[in-house]
Image (cartoon, rainbow, N blue to C red):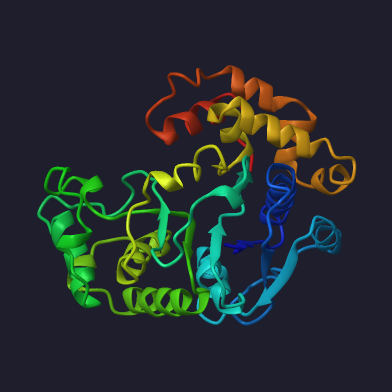
Amino acid sequence: MSFNILAIAQAGRLEHEAILLAASLRHSDPDFAGTLYIAEPQPGPKWREDPRIANRTRKTLTELGATILPFESRVFGSDYPNGNKIEALAALPDAPFLFLDTDTLVTGPLSQIAFDFTRPSASMLRENTWPKVELYGPSATQTWKALYDRFGLDFDSSLDPTQPRDYWQRFLYFNAGWFFHESPRAFGNRFLSWSREIHDAPPAELVCQELYPWLDQITLPLVVHSFGGGRPGPELAALDGSATCHYRTLPLLYARESDHAVGVLETVAADPRLRPVLRHWGAFKRMVLQGEGAKARALFDRADLPRREQVIRNTLKREGLWVR
């Protein structure tokens, strides 16, 4: 089945990450039959500065086969840029889609993954970031159940019964780095509506909870569950595996990702058509062109990485190798 890919680009780091995403898709999946849409927020009252990408980026992305997709930010904008992935869905043609965070490399053929777009799912590459349970409650179970109840969803069927009660992995919780469905219009409308309701009128159980920057990841499992989806099965193992690498930052990519992922980065980065544009990105200049990525990589044993990402980040910062 042919499907489209959606990613977000705006002025600054994301526009350069979008170039790497587009170039890696072309390199790793030359037979991809869908369209890569790079959604670009347009200036408006929700943005304090013009969010549009540079003309040189626009030209490069188009040459790589991407389609630039302008969209209006009517709800989020500068106050919550993560909301771009929610609002951009309304601009996408209503056909099966895979959303990818822009800080993702395509490292294998996405076109060979056996998606069931009628059963949405999302990335399990997450940590215990939300909710933060206070000493006197409410518990994690009470917090999540209040959200399911708010939207008329069956809470119990979303749980992983193999996990202990109130343990964070018992609950349906995703990283919003990738997700998919058969209809961006239906999925996006519900994602936006429920995100706004959680933000504007959260259940009482959320009164002590931080909603930013987690709002998309709070709402996403509710939307996935409401459309009959859930945790990804083994047929999707290539996502966050052999077919995609959600690296987050270039220092983290060099520190912890596979030799293959680093090889894909450096292969596409060697393209002389891309370097004049990518050198405007400070992290690329330092990590790739000036070789500091190799220094970051030498600090860690990929077979024995720290369990928490923050430990890796702190080490990179201490060595002066943290740059975005």
The residue at the point 43 percent across, 46 percent down is 235
Quarter of the figure with residue 296:
top right
Of the pair 280 and 166, the residue shown nearer to us: 166
Query: Can you give x and y, in whole percent of width and height, for residue 283 in the image?
Result: 70, 40
Quarter of the figure with residue 244:
top right
The residue at the point 75 percent across, 61 percent down is 66
In the drawing, does residue 57 fall left or right of residue 225? right
Q: Name the residue at the front extreme.
A: 1
Query: Can you give x and y, in whole percent of width and height, for residue 176 in the image?
Result: 45, 56
Of the pair 76 and 230, the residue shown nearer to us: 230
Q: Is residue 143 visible?
A: no
Above or below, comparing residue 191 to residue 123 in the picture: below
Above or below, comparing residue 324 to residue 84 in the picture: above
Query: Can you give x and y, in whole percent of width and height, for residue 195 in the image?
Result: 39, 73
Above or below, comparing residue 123 to residue 66 in the picture: above
Of the pair 32 and 273, the residue shown nearer to us: 32
Query: Can you give x and y, in whole percent of width and height, for residue 227 in the image?
Result: 34, 71
